[in-house]
Amino acid sequence: MKFVHHRAEMSILGEIYDGVREGRGRVALVGGPVASGKTTLLGRLADRALESGAVVLQAIATEPERTLPYGVVGQLLQSPAVSAELAEEFAGLLDAGESTPVEDRAAVLQQTARTIAAALVKLSRTAPLLLVVDDLHHADDESLHCLLFLLLRIRAARIMVALGERTSDRSAGPAFHAELVRLPHCRRIRLATLPADGVVDLITGELGADAARLLAPGCHELTGGNLLLVHALLEDHRSAGGPAEPVPGFAFRDAVLSCLRSSGPAALDVAAAVAVLGGAVDAARAAELLGAPADETVRSLGDLEAAGILAAGRFRHAAAAAAVLEAVEPGRRAELRRRAARLRYDEGADSTTVAEMLVAAEDLDEPWAVTVLRTAAERALAEDDVEKVVRYLEPVSRRGDTAQRVAVTTLLADAEWRVSPVAAERRVRALAADLGETGTEPGPLRHLLWHGGADEASRAFARFAGEGGLSLDAEALCLAAACTHPALAARLPAPARPAGTRPVPSGTVVDTQWRAARILRGVLRGRHGDNVVVAVEQILQSTRLADATIQPLTFALRALMYAGSTERALPWCERLLEEASKRRAPAWQAVFSALRAEIAVRQGGLPAAREHAAKALSLISAPSWGVAIGSPLASLIRVHTETGAHDEAEALLAQPVPDAMLRTVYALPYLYARGRHQLATDQVYAALREFMAVGELMSAWGIDIPSLVPWRLGCAEAYLRIGDRPKAAELVDGQLNLVSESNAAALGATLRVLANTHELADRPPMLKKAVDEIQAGGDRLELAKALADLGRTHHELNETSRARMMVRRAWHVAKDCQAEAVCGELLPHLSAEDMKPVAAEAGEAQRLASLTSAEYRTAALARHGYTNREIARKLFITVSTVEQHLTRTYRKLKVGNRADLPAGLEPTIAGTA
C-alpha cells in the first residue's frame, strides 16, 4: 500500500475547498519546518482542484527574487487561464510603476492590487479559483501587498488562497502576517515531521513490513521524521545492498544540505556553528561564535530542531555534521574553528574538546595552544589512544623553546614507543644534543638507551648533572641505565648523595623507578637480603602499567627471577601481559612476552617459551627491539636447541643483532644460548669460547651471579665433553660458592654437573640431591636432565631396575616439556619392554602439552587437592576463571572431574606447560 502523508491535513484542505465551490472564499496558511511535506500537500490540493474543474494559479517564491517587484504575482498571472487583457493591463501597470517617481509609487501599487483583485474575483464567477503560493517567506513586498488586498475581498467569492510557509520564518513581513491571522476566513494548518509510527508506515509502503521493523527505529532516530531525510536514508539503504540498519550515505548528506539551503541564509551558518562546537549547543554560544543576532540564531536553531536535523542542540548523526562542515568555505570553516577553540577555552572546556578544535583549525599560534594540546595528549595517553596523542602533538613538536620541544617530543615518543619503538627512537635522537639543557626532561634517555645510544646518553647525563648534580628523576634513570648497560656505569655521573639518603617522594613514578633500579642492582651484584621478594611485590602491587613504569616493572620481575623466585614472577608477568594486550600496546606486549618466555625457559617449559618468544618477536620489528632483542632471541634459540631443531636455531643465530647489544645485559643470555647451541652440535671449543666470554663480561661488570646466566656450568659441561674433569670441577665449585641455597633450581643444576665431575660410584647421592632441589625449584628441563644422568649412572653401575625406573621417569618429564634432545639421549637405554609404558606416558605428556600455561597451573593444583577458592588466591585470579580453566582442561585431557586428572601434573613445576 502506498504511503500517504498528512491525510488529516489534506482532508481539512479538501473541506475548505468544498466550501469555496459553494461561494465561501477561504485562506489556508500551511506552515511547517523544512521538508515537512508542505509542497507535496499543496500540490495534491492543486491536483484535486483541477480534477473538479477549478482554475488553478500557482507560484513559488524564491530567495533570489525577493527583491523583484511583483515577482510572485507575475507567476500567478502567467497562467493560460488568465485573460490576455489582464496580462496586458498588469504589464502596463508594471511599466508605469517603474517610471513613476518613488513618492507616487504607493498609488500605483494600490491601483495594481485593485486591478488584480477585481480581475481574479471576476474570473472566479466562471469557475472556482485556487491560488497556490509556496515558500511565502521569500515573497516580494509588492506581491504580498497585492495578495493581502485580494484576501480582504474574497470572503463571498469562489476563491481559495493556499499559502505555504516555513514555520517560524517571518521574513515575508510582520505586517502581512498580522493582517492575515486576523481574517475570520483564514485557517492555519501546522505540519510536523513524521512520528515514529509514520516512519514505520512509510517504510512498510516502500520496502515491506520486515524491513520496517529493522529500519524504522533507526530511521526515525536519525531523521526526526523529516520526509526528505527518511527517503534519502532509504536510498542509501538500497545503494548499500540492504544492511540491517540505516547507514547514512551520499543521499543523506545531500538531503541535509538541501534542507539547510531551504531554511534560509542563516541556517547553514548556525548548523556550522553547531558542528564546530560539538555536543549540545545553545543559542547564546552559537550566536557568540557567529557574531550574529541572538534572536536570529534562536529562530534558526528552532527551525533545525523542528526539521529533525538537530536534537537537543546537536546533530543526530556525525554524517550530518560532516556534510555541513564540508559545505562551508574552507577559510570560513577554519575561522569558525579558531573562534570556537578560543570560546571553549575561555569557558574552561576540557582540554580534549579544545584540542580537537585547535588541530582542526590548524591554528596553533595562540600562546595557550601548546599547553592545551599537551594536557589533552596526556589524557589521551592515559586512555591508551596513541593516534590522538600524535594528532595533537605532531603539529607543535618543532615549536617553542628547547624545554618545550623536549617535553612535547618525550610525550610523543612515549606514545609511539607503545606501537613502534624505532619510530620513537628516531624522534628522540633528533633532539639528543638538547637533552640536559635547562628545563629539559631526562625521560627521552630511556629511548636512546633502548636503541644502544649509550654515548649520547652519557653526554646527556653529564649535562643533566651540571654543577648542582642530578635531579631525582635523572638519577633514577641513571641507576636504571647501570642495570641494563653495565658497561656504561663507569661513565655515569655519581649521585649527589649516597643511595638511600636522598628524599624521594613516596608513591611517585620517580620513587618506583628508584626503588626498582636499586633492588635489581643489588640482586645483580649478589647483595640482597631475604626481604627482596616482599620489596619487589610491593612495587608490583602499587604500580600501574604506564610508559614511565614499564621499565621498573620489568626490573621488578627480573629481580624476582634472579633472586630465585621465578614462580613468584610468573603470575605477575601474565597479569601485566594481559593488561598490555587489553590496552593495545604491541611493544608492551612484546616486552612482557619476552619476559614470559624467559620464565618458561627457567622452568623448563619449552612449548610456552617457544610460544611467547615467537610472539614477542612478531609483535614488533627487529629494529624496534633495539638492544633488548637479545632476550627473545636467546629464549627461542634455547628452545630450538633443547628440542633438537638445530637448523631453526642456526637461522636465528644468523640474524644480525646490534653491535651495541654486546655492551648490555641482553648480550649475556644471547651469548649463552649461542654457546648451548654450539655445545649441542658438537662445536665444543666454540661453545667454550662463548661461555668464557659471558663470564668475562659478567666479571667485568660486577654482576657475576649464577642466577643471571650460569656460564660456569656451560664451561664445565664443555670441559667434560673434552675430558678435562678437573677443570670442570673447578668451575662447578666456583659456582657452588656463589649460588644461593634459596635458589633450589640453580643449586640443583649445579649439583647435577658437579656429580658428573666425580667418580661413577659417588654420583648417585649427588644426583638424587640434585633431583630433589630441581623438583623444588620447578625447572622441568633440568629435572629431565638430572633424572637422565641418574638413570645412566645406575645403568653404568649395573643397577638395572633403578636405571629403568629413572630413565622412564626422565623420558616422561622430557617428553612433557618437548625436550627431544634429552629423549634422543635416552633412547639407547630403553628396552622393548620399557617402550610400552614409555609410549603410554608419552601420550599422556602430549595431552598435557596441549594445555595452556594457565590451565596447567590450575589443573596441577586441583590434582593435588586445592579447592577452587584456594587456587584462585594462589594464582591471583577469580574463582570463575578457575572453573573455566578446569572445564577446558577436562575436555582436552578427556576426563570427567579432578579426581581423574593424571598424576603427571606437578604443582611445584606448574605453569610451564
Image (cartoon, grey):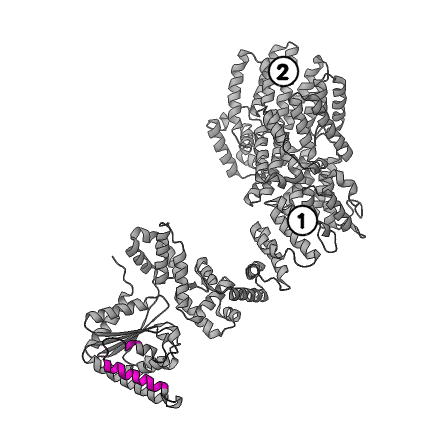
Query: Hey, which residue is sitting farthest top in the picture?
Result: 798
- Find out whether the residues at labels 2 and 1 contact each other: C-beta distance under 8 Å: no
- Where in the figure is residue 428, as x and y percent of width and height? 67, 49
Residue interval drawn in magenta: 75-98
**Callout 2 secondary element:** helix
Would you identify the image quadrant in which residue 573 lies? top right
Q: Is 747 positioned to the left or the right of 7 in the image?
A: right
For the residue pair 787 and 547, the one nearer the viewer reads as 547
Q: Is 261 positioned to the left or the right of 689 in the image?
A: left
Label 2 Cα neighbours within 10 Å, binned few <14 / some 14-19 / many ≥20: many
90 within the magenta span:
yes
| Mark 2 or 1: the one toward you | 1
491 within the magenta span:
no
Label 1 Cα neighbours within 10 Å, binned few <14 / some 14-19 / many ≥20: many
- Where in the figure is residue 31, as x and y percent of width and height? 34, 72
Q: CA distance from mark 2 to mark 1?
A: 57 Å
Would you identify the image quadrant in which residue 780 lies? top right
Disc ID at residue 428: 1
Q: Is residue 287 visible?
A: yes
For the residue pair 17 and 858, the one nearer the viewer reads as 17
Q: Which residue is mark 2?
A: 791
